[in-house]
Image (cartoon, rainbow, N blue to C red):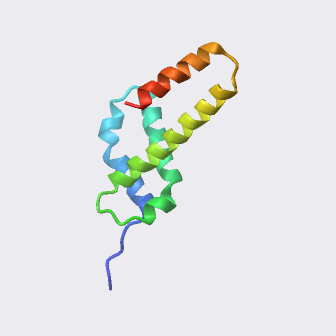
Amino acid sequence: MGRTIPTFRYLIESFGIEWNDFKRVLKKIDKEAFEELLNHARKHGAAGSNIAIPNPFEPIVMSILIEHEKTIRSLMEKIDKSNDLEFKVAKDLLCMFLKF
């Protein structure tokens, strides 16, 4: 019989367990943020299962980055639709920052 390869979802859960000592000392708001990051990775379980990388950290981080990119795009769209000048200035500053 061949070896069973753990699923990506299992790897995400294992990753969360391995980082429990780190998570335990975080402030409550940071613990919540940590859990949200793992939730971002869970959303992309199917994609993570399709990549053969021995280190599961890479697809976990990529999944988190995808979710962050979607959030940034959504916020930029809301700013574009807004007539508030302060939002427009904030968007320009953010765009300058993201280009570095």
Left or right: where 22 falls relative to 79: left
Which residue is located at x 36 percent, y 74 percent? Answer: 4
Specify the quadrant of the image occupied by residue 8: bottom left
The residue lying toward the viewer, choosing from 7 and 54, is 54
Residue farthest along the top direction in this orientation: 86
The quadrant of the picture occupied by the N terminus is: bottom left
The image quarter containing residue 25 is top left
Q: Can the viewer see residue 94?
A: yes
Above/below status of 79 relative to 41: above
Query: Which quadrant: the C terminus?
Result: top left
- Above or below: residue 77 compared with residue 11: above
Residue 82 location in percent, x, y?
69, 23
Q: Nearer the viewer, residue 63 or 15?
A: 63
Whether residue 28 is visible here, answered yes or no, is no
Q: Which residue is at the front of the view, 56 or 95?
A: 95
Up-down relation of residue 39 to residue 44 (above or below): above
At x 41%, y 53%, the residue is: 12
The x and y percentages for residue 49 are 44, 64
At 61% from the left edge and 36% from the top edge, which residue is drawn?
Answer: 74
Q: Residue 15 appears at what percent x and percent y?
A: 35, 50
Residue occupying image coordinates x 32% and y 82%: 2
Position of 2 relative to 69 (above/below): below
Q: Residue furthest bottom?
A: 1
Q: In this figure, what is the number of numbered marks?
A: 0
